[in-house]
């Protein structure tokens, strides 16, 4: 979900991380993520650092580096899990509800042998997000619907080449 103009995590990202923390502690799971690298200099490092602050006592974090969209994220995480020989029979994706359907399509294609489940949270957006389409619930819902249609019509490779428009 990137960073807002003040280099803070948006509220939805905070909610996703809080829910992820709850799920991971219950299941003794590993947490894997990749961070947006197109929000400005070192944005992936800043975002990852802010995420890690939510998990100060959690040792099983896998950071797959900088990414540009959800397809690239899933692939980067797959590469990192394979590199570290981490089994991934069951993957739970925590995301906001508008993103859930396309996330399920993406992750099932990237991890065809894994059981993919989605745990969704409510999205909360504000106009301080650098990604224009993530500034309101309506814009984000439209973006998610368009991505879903694009995945169905254009395919995952086309979607992998897309990036959110930005305004700083």
Image (cartoon, rainbow, N blue to C red):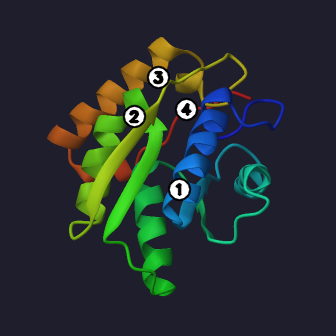
Q: Earlier in the sequence, mark 3 or mark 4?
A: 3
Could you tell whether 55 is left or right of 117 in the image? right
For the residue labelled by badge 3, is the local secondary structure a helix, a strand or a loop? helix
| Picture disc at residue 8 | none
Q: Residues within 10 Å of mark 4 (few under 14, many from 20)?
A: few
Mark pair 3, 1: CA separation: 30 Å
* Mark whose residue sits in front, 1 or 2: 1
Q: In the image, is residue 35 above or below residue 151?
A: below
Query: Residue 97, how many percent across, how many down?
Result: 40, 29
Q: Residue at x 25, y 57 (%)?
A: 108
Q: Residue lying farthest front?
A: 26
Which residue is disc 3 drawn over? 140
Judge from the rendering whether residue 63 lies leftward or rightward of residue 98; answer left or right: right
Extreme residue toward the left, this view: 153
Q: Residue 143's quadrant in the figure?
A: top left
Q: Secondary structure at mark 4?
A: loop
Camera-nearest label, 1 or 4: 1
- Identity of the residue drawn at 61% across and 34% down: 15
Q: 102 or 67, which is in the foreground? A: 102
Name the spot of residue 82 as percent of width and height, x first: 42, 82
**Residue located beneath label 2 in the image:** 99
Q: Give the CA separation, mark 3 to mark 4.
A: 12 Å
Image spot of residue 37 (x, y percent): 65, 53
In front: mark 3 or mark 1? 1
Quadrant where the image shows the C terminus: top right
Whether the residues at callouts 1 and 4 have beta carbons within 8 Å, the answer is no
Q: Is residue 98 left or right of residue 7?
A: left
> How many marks can you see?
4
Residue contact at pointers 2 and 3, CB within 8 angstroms: yes
User: In this figure, which residue is indicated by the disc labeled 4?
Assistant: 165
């Amino acid at each position: 979900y990137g960073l807002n103009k003040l280099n803070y995590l948006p509220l939805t990202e905070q909610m996703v991380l809080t829910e992820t923390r709850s799920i991971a502690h219950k299941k003794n799971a590993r947490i894997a993520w990749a961070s947006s690298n197109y929000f400005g200099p070192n944005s992936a490092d800043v975002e990852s650092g802010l995420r890690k602050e939510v998990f100060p006592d959690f040792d099983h974090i896998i950071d797959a580096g900088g990414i540009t969209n959800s397809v690239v994220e899933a692939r980067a995480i797959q590469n990192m899990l394979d590199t570290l020989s981490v089994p991934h029979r069951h993957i739970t994706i925590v995301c906001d509800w508008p993103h859930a359907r396309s996330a399920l399509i993406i992750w099932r294609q990237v991890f065809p042998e894994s059981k993919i489940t989605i745990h969704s949270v409510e999205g909360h957006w504000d106009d301080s997000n650098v990604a224009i389409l993530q500034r309101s619930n309506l814009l984000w819902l439209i973006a998610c619907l368009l991505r879903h249609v694009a995945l169905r019509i254009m395919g995952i490779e086309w979607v992998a080449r897309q990036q959110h428009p930005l305004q700083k």
